[in-house]
Amino acid sequence: MMPFYRSLNIRTQSVLLVAAVGFFASSTPCVAAVDDSGKYLFICTGDQARKSPDFLAVVNFDEGSSQYGHVIGKADVQGASATGNEFHHIGMSADGTTVVCGGLLSVLKSQDEIFFFDVSNPRAPKFHSSANPPLSAITDDFQSLPQGGFLVTMMGGAQGHSPGRVAEFNGQLELVKEYPETPPAEGFNPHGISLRPEVNLMVTSDFICPSTTLDAVAGGLDFRGSVRVWNLRHRTILRTIEIPGAGGTIDVKLIPGDRSERGYTAGMLDEHLYLLDTRRGTAKAVFDFATISKGGWPQLLRLTRDGRRLFISMNQAGKVAMLDISRPDEPRLLKILDLGANSGPHYIALTRDEKRLIISDYFLNQDGFGKVHAEGDHKIHVAVVTSSDLRLDQRFQLDFNTAFAQGPARPHGVAVLERTYAHD
């Protein structure tokens, strides 16, 4: 081959060389696949100084990649609502092409509260648009809809008080409506949300009256203790499950496939896990998190698809707990994952195969204007999950204090994308 190649003129050699490069580039995708296999984390992130734009970070999540755990992309919010939103929870559309982040404190600057990103090319996300529902504020959690779009819990009214709403956006990211038509006058500050469309069921949990977290509002924090049971199709509240003394029912999750249509919520301050009977409108304390760590602030819940295991972040304890819930009224502790000093786990997300749990170490710091100061250490952790164990993946080391040139950032909501990506 070499003598033949050298016998050709320079121009012909060049043509053959270009053709060969093109052939191997298109015929050996395994070379590129090492660093780009279609596995990503999207993380809603706020600038700690509240000066640079809030942004969506993209992290390589391929365990076989040399870039595993590295930030490989970033999209800043554009326009007048770019800074100081305190990015909080996250949502991903059913088709995996849109990510949405909520601005927990956007209302303080009278700016848009919900921010959409185009992630059809996950390595190069683009800011798409923002929205500002007129009747509500203090964006919290997102639930994607099978036909496209999202349901969004809005903890407060337009000025951050009560009542809040649940806002709906369609597949074109247009606001459909804010529900319910006539919300409960007292204590309706929805934070957590969970759906079971096959039984026409939705639940939301009330957490706190947001305005009471500000220094400008006298008095202490006004926590809620209630779960609303909804007719999903009609977007109407059927009944309220009152849990006096719970001290902030921050999240709620329905048990997948449960014939009795039960679910769980946790009282952040009374430290109990409650089993919910959505048909009867009752709640029963079934586990005491104080046995793990008193004052630990149990917060967000995640359940496996088979309804047999439950994960919960314990923010002030710096721990994540895994429980066996195969007998829903008798949960059994399987494992406690300790993230160490100065940690503050809040948001947690399971991978599609449920073999990894992603944890972000930041809740909320209202700096010099509010009463909540739960900073955490700004790290993202990954835990390997088995049927009875939870252990840290030591290969994954990501610190948002040092990952960006602009300076320390606060990571919050995490979404996982796992798909085959067509390489360029």
Image: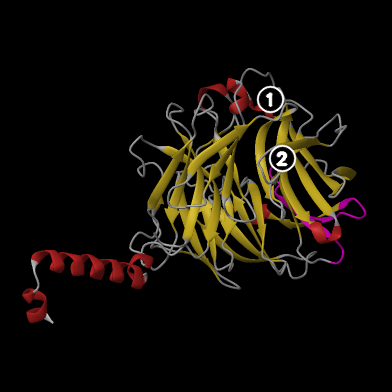
Q: Measuring from the top left, give residue 185's x and y in whole percent.
A: 86, 29
Part of the protein shown in magenta: 259-282
- Residue at (66% x, 35% y) in the render: 139
- Please report whichever mark, 2 or 1, sits nearer to the chain's N-terminal start: 2
Give percent across and percent down for residue 50.
46, 28
Position of the C terminus, as image quadrant, is bottom left
How are the colours assigned in the image?
Answer: secondary structure
Residue marked by disc 2: 153
Q: Position of residue 377 (x, y in %)?
A: 45, 44
Compare residues 81 and 270 and report the one nearer the observer: 81
Residue placed at 61% from the left, 28% from the top?
A: 112
The quadrant of the rendering that contains the N terminus is bottom left
Q: Residues within 10 Å of mark 1 (few under 14, many from 20)?
A: many
CA distance separating discs 2 and 1: 16 Å
Q: Is residue 411 magenta?
A: no
Is residue 385 at least partly visible in the picture?
yes
**Which of labels 2 and 1 is toward the front?**
2
Going by the image, does 25 lie left or right of 93?
A: left
Q: Examine the image and state in which quarter residue 159 appears.
A: top right
Do we see residue 340 in this rendering?
A: no
Label 2 crowding class (10 Å Cα cut-off): few <14, some 14-19, many 20+? many
Q: Position of residue 51 (x, y in %)?
A: 43, 26
Q: Is residue 278 magenta?
A: yes
